Structures are given as structure tokens and as C-alpha cells.
Amino acid sequence: MLTLLLLLTSACSSDSLPDSPAQHDSADDDSVSIEQQQQELAAGFGISDPPPVEVIRLVTPEDRQQLVADCLLEQGFDTAEIIDSGLPSDQVAAYNLAEYVCAASYPINPDFMGAYTDRQISIQYDWTVDSVIPCLRAEGYTISDPPSREVFIETYTTDPFYPFAELFDLQLSNAEWNALEVRCPQIAPTNLLFPDAN
């Protein structure tokens, strides 16, 4: 869930992002953004004194999902299994710490964070309508119909339509949430949003 929130807040910021990732002028730009990601992760997982985490590499949002899932599996947490059977309450704190370490090890490349252009929002609309909503419904969740493309684009930074937001009241655990995100990726693939980056 926290990974989702980090993606959503970065995609809805007021800074504009070009159609392809910009090159940063210095390593300081990356490290500030990475540090900010780690702080947001720690806060979201309720970790008041997070351990230092060595960054393995910068990744795309969809690569991160699989890398974090693989990392969690190495630490004994199978996210696919968790969504089917749940996570015992006595393992929640250990899971949250493990997910923090795994996600912080693979921060999202700052080039792929920031506000989307109208073209990118339109691509996200298609992804939401054609992939996210049908997937969540197939998983058994009730999701409302999306707004029109025009309304989706117009309200993306002020009152965005996110099908996953309709699941917040279900109080899924982070493990259940992340397993669902692996099955139904919410954000359009990077190669669609940033075709010039490939």
C-alpha cells in the first residue's frame, strides 16, 4: 500500500515532467529524492527509527514491485500466498520492517517521478479502464465506473480517480495490498508512460 501511496503522491505533484525522463545535473538531485522516498516509506510503515539501507539500484515502478516481492520472499514473506491466506498479526511488524528494507533498497528512479503530462494521464486512463478496473473486479472487488477521459485528465491532480482508493475501507494489510498490486498493477507500465526512455 505504501508503495502505491508513494507513486500516487509523486505522480500528482505540481511539478511538470517531460514526456521522457530528464537527466539530473548532479547526484545530489537523486540522493535528495531517494532520501525523501525512504523517509516516506518509514513513516508509512510506522518505523520511527529506520535502519540504514544501502541502495542496490534505481528502478522503474513496475520493476520495483517484483524486486520487492522477490526480496520479501527471501525474507520469508510470500506476497502471493499472503493475499490468499492473510498475514498473522504477530508478523505484521516484522513484515513492515522487511518491506521497508526491500523497498528502500530499490528506490524508484527520480526520472520517473513527478507530475504527468496530459498525454501521460490519458495513457494512465486507458490503463485504468482496460486493465486495473477489470483486474480488481475479477479479484472480487466492487469498483465504481470511471469518469470520462476528459474528467479523468482534468481532475487528475485535484481529485483523481484511483480504483484502489475504493479499497481503503477494507483495511487490507500491507502484505495483502502489495500482493494485490502485483496481480493488478495500478500504474501504467513505464514503457507506455515514457516511451522515449527505452
Image (cartoon, grey):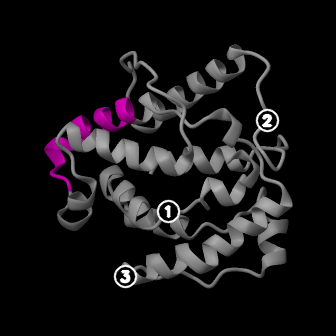
Predominant SS along the magenta part:
helix
**Which is nearer the N-term, disc 1 or disc 3?**
3
71 displayed left or right of 136: left
Residue at (77, 29) in percent of width and height: 23
Q: Residues within 10 Å of mark 2 (few under 14, many from 20)?
A: few
Image: magenta residue range: 87-102
Q: Nearer the viewer, mark 2 or mark 1?
A: 2
Q: Amino acid at mark 1?
A: Pro
Badge 3 amino acid: Gly
> Quarter of the image holding residue 149?
bottom right
Magenta span includes 101: yes
Label 3 sits on residue:
140
Residue picked out by circle 2: 22
Question: Marks 1/3: CA distance?
Answer: 16 Å
Q: State the separation of the CA atoms marked 2 and 1.
A: 24 Å
Residue at 65% from the left image edge and 56% from the top image edge: 191
Amino acid type at circle 2 is Ala
Return the disc, 2 or 3, that comes first in the chain's sequence.
2
Find residue 83 and report its horizontal and vertical position in percent.
26, 63
Q: Which residue is mark 1?
A: 185
Label 1 neighbourhood size at 10 Å, few (<14), some (14-19), many (20+)? many
